[in-house]
Image: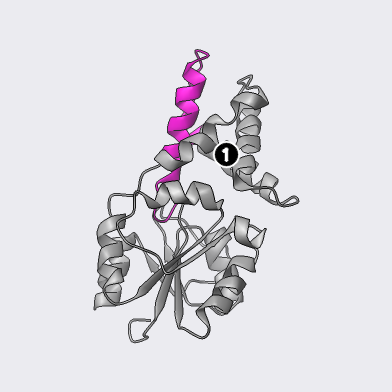
Amino acid sequence: MSDMEFDVITFDCYGTLIDWESGIVGAFRDEASRDGIEMAPDRIIEAYMEAEASVESGPYVPYREVLARSAVRVAERLGWDLRPERARFLPDSLPDWQPFPDTNAALERLARRHRLGILSNVDDELLGGTLRHLRVSFDLIVTAEQVKSYKPGFAHFEEAGRRLRGSRQLHAAQSYFHDVVPARALNIPVVWVNRKGEQATPGGPLPTKEVRDLTALADHLDA
């Protein structure tokens, strides 16, 4: 991949640029503490990933609603009696979720030579809150709200392709399931930003390149 040139680098946002796990854990623990309940971070994330995937697999609803419905399911699984009207704590917390320590410096390096974009399973309004934490501008933004679909569906990638009009795209993302698999199915070069040291599905598609974080991606593309 190092000898290939790209015009645009698109990113997944939450998990790739933004530390969504810390954001979700903090939101759950803060809200549950009001009821005197303590929750283990790993149990929150495990339950959340299962709940979100289930909600997103049904008919499209805005991501704010995905977060709220997922919060209720997580609470139920972990033994916390959370009424649906209180579940808004989770989407309300999203604009405060912070970038990973390497995110902004790496994006600034990459922006010197490439246009940048975001392909994210989120609502436009919620993403607007997140963009306040990022020190670069993005030439392309495709959200779930715009395409009425969630990755790993193809709609984000197909819409990006239409807007890019033949520009050479490289996609970078942390989620193997949501991003690497559909990108490879569409023959889009993809860097797996494997922050958690996960393994690809046996027999599944492999990324074009694998790196541990965004600094490593910037180093590779500068080489």
Q: Reply above or below: 162 against 122.
A: below
The residue at the point 56 percent across, 51 percent down is 123
Report whether residue 203 is seen.
Answer: no
For the C terminus, the image quarter is bottom left
Q: Which color scheme is applied?
A: one colour
Residue 173: give x, y in percent of width and height: 46, 62
Residue 47: give x, y in percent of width and height: 59, 37
Q: Is residue 223 left or right of residue 95?
A: left
The residue at the point 64 percent across, 67 percent down is 155
Q: Is residue 109 left or right of residue 30?
A: left
Give the farthest residue toward the top: 36
The residue at the point 47 percent across, 35 percent down is 93
Disc 1 marks which residue? Answer: 48
Please state the extent of the stretch shown in magenta in the rendering: 15-43
Q: Reply above or below: 179 against 70.
A: below
The residue at the point 30 percent across, 70 percent down is 111
For the N terminus, the image quarter is bottom left
Residue 190: give x, y in percent of width and height: 47, 72
Observer-nearest of 30 and 184 = 30
Residue 16 magenta-highlighted? yes
The quarter of the displayed image where residue 208 is located: bottom left
Residue 172: give x, y in percent of width and height: 43, 66
Residue 1 magenta-highlighted? no
Local SS, label 1: helix
Q: Amino acid at mark 1?
A: Tyr
Q: Is residue 147 left or right of residue 43?
A: right
Report whether residue 115 is seen.
Answer: yes
